[in-house]
Amino acid sequence: WLSGSLWWRNFIRKIGRSITVCYGLPYAWLVQGVLSLTIVISYIAVFAMASVAIGAPLPLIGLITAIPLCLLTMVFPITVGGWGTREAAAAVLWPLLGLTGDQGIAASVLYGAIVTLGTLPGLALFIWSTSRRR
């Protein structure tokens, strides 16, 4: 039991050091903030393009309200990759913007497909690197 306690202490120390490296160095918080904001903006842009692609462009208010709310539903640990919760949110939110729930679902499914396909190069690299190590 005591060795398990030591394991947790070491784990907490390592996390503390990682947080210090990520945020404690001069201007690291600024770099992290800019990178995080850039990523969120890219997610919103992909979702907006998916909505345009299915023929349901969102007004500006939708870009700053509906899409972030749809993306926020993905943090609930009840689905894989946010599938289901994101579509449900889009089905509810798109009609508030003068579009149909079906259009919201279609945009969300297309967004999910685009993001999933975007991960395939990383998966290929992972498979290649693990097979190379063997």
Image (cartoon, grey):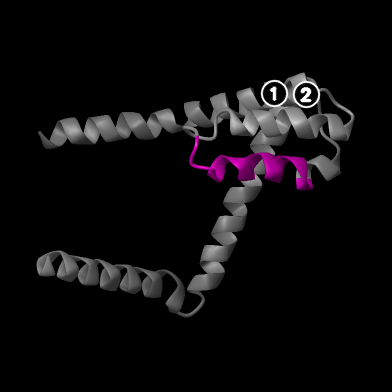
Tell me if residue 23 is in the magenta stretch. no
Under mark 2, the amino acid is Gly
Res. 43 in view:
no
Label 1 belongs to which residue? Answer: 105
Foreground residue among 46 and 2: 2
Element at badge 2? helix
The location of residue 112, given as percent across then percent down, is: 57, 28
For the stretch drawn in magenta, the main secondary structure is: helix
Q: Is residue 132 left or right of residue 80?
A: left
The location of residue 31, given as percent across then percent down, is: 53, 66
Res. 119 in view:
yes
Q: Which quadrant of the figure contains the C terminus?
A: top left
**Callouts 1 and 2 close, C-beta under 8 Å:** yes
Q: What are the residue bounds of the magenta stretch?
A: 64-78
The location of residue 124, given as percent across then percent down, is: 32, 29
Q: Residue at x 48, y 72 (%)?
A: 28
Q: Residue at x 69, y 23 (%)?
A: 105
In this rendering, is residue 49 above or below 61? Answer: above
- Quadrant position of residue 113: top right
- Residue count near mark 2 (Cα–Cα under 10 Å), binned few <14, some 14–19, many ≥20: some
Q: Is residue 25 left or right of residue 44?
A: left
Tell me if residue 74 is in the magenta stretch. yes
Label 2 belongs to which residue? Answer: 101
